[in-house]
Amino acid sequence: MTIVTIANQKGGVAKTTSAVNLGHGAAKRGLSVLVVDLDTQGNVADALGMDEGSDLYDWLITGKDTEQVAQPTGRENLRIIRSNKTTAQLKVAASGMDFREMIVANALQAYEDDLIILDCPPSVDILHTAALVAADWLLIPTKLDQFAIKGVIEMLRSLDSVQRATRSNCKLAGIIPTFYDQVTSESHAQLKNLAEQYKSLVWPPVAADTNCRVANRVGKTLWEMPVNARAKVGYTACLDRLMKII
Ligand SMILES: Nc1ncnc2c1ncn2[C@@H]1O[C@H](COP(=O)(O)OP(=O)(O)O)[C@@H](O)[C@H]1O
Ligand SMILES: [Mg+2]
């Protein structure tokens, strides 16, 4: 089993979009996949056309049975643990616990999926730390703007401090450049910048593509969209990279 956490302290960089599309992509390639939503906004369920739910709270706080917590998505090999506003209460409840940064790692021991993807909130909170403790690998999606590298550096600092403070073995798997715009020089310049700094850790860029927004709105993954979405090319190449670390 491989656990991958998708994180960046910045919001709107395509964390959830990457979690859902890589998760469903890997499921379509035959792996059994569980996507865990760690954000109060419950966007993983939205993106898959499902209702939000308090599964995360029930799982981590009330200790609800593992098999009842993971929800089928109607897609072969793909289940999710949903989140909603109760996740805010979860954070309060967890803050008083001993070994709280182990909360996700411990709970995940009950699962045997080939791939578990943790979709992180855009903040440094207990769940963000617990995800880094639980994961084998960190994937950082980033937009290609002037703040991109700063966000990546902040995330790597966060990983470094979690590694120092805990026994986390999480390593950087890669950086996914998202919202790549072939036309603008800013996109090119920032991609070059990232490549100079992080070399082969930079995964193939995912094009800015309105189909991502449309897919999100209608609760489908890119693989379920009939159109030839440009972002599919990037996520297919990222999936090839992902398969190498599972
Ligand atoms: N490659 C892309 N091109 C255009 N829009 C995108 C792309 N990836 C994601 N989006 C859209 O951007 C918004 C933020 O993406 P999301 O995955 O929710 O980010 P995060 O989880 O980092 O906050 C969503 O509306 C999503 O549909
Ligand atoms: Mg999100």
Image (spheres, rainbow, N blue to C red):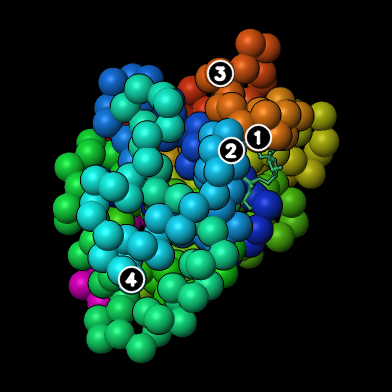
* Bounds of the magenta segment: 166-173
User: Mark 2–mark 4 contact, CB under 8 Å?
Assistant: no
Helix, strand or loop for disc 1:
helix
- The amino acid type of the residue labelled 3 equals Glu
- Eye-nearest disc, 4 or 3: 4
Q: Identify the mark nearer the N-term, 1 or 2.
A: 2
Say which residue label 3 marks.
Answer: 224
Query: Crowding near pointer 1: few (<14 within 10 Å), some, many (20+)?
Result: many
Q: Secondary structure at mark 4?
A: loop
Can residue 12 be seen?
A: yes
Q: Position of residue 171 (x, y in %)?
A: 32, 56
Distance in Å between CA atoms under marks 3 and 2: 12 Å
Q: Quadrant of residue 55?
A: bottom left
Provide the major secondary structure of the magenta segment. Answer: loop
Whichever of callouts 3 and 1 sits on the residue coming sooner in the sequence is 1
Tag 4 residue:
61
Quarter containing the C terminus = top left
User: Sequence order check: which comes first, mark 4 or mark 1?
Assistant: 4
Location of mark 1 (residue): 216
Verify CB contact (< 8 Å) between mark 1 and mark 2. Answer: yes
Observer-side mark, 4 or 1, equals: 4
10 Å crowding of disc 3: few (<14), some (14-19), many (20+): few
What is the x, y in percent for residue 8? 55, 59
Left or right: residue 164 versus residue 6 is left
| Residue 43 among magenta residues | no
Answer with mark 4 or mark 3, whichever residue precedes in sequence: 4
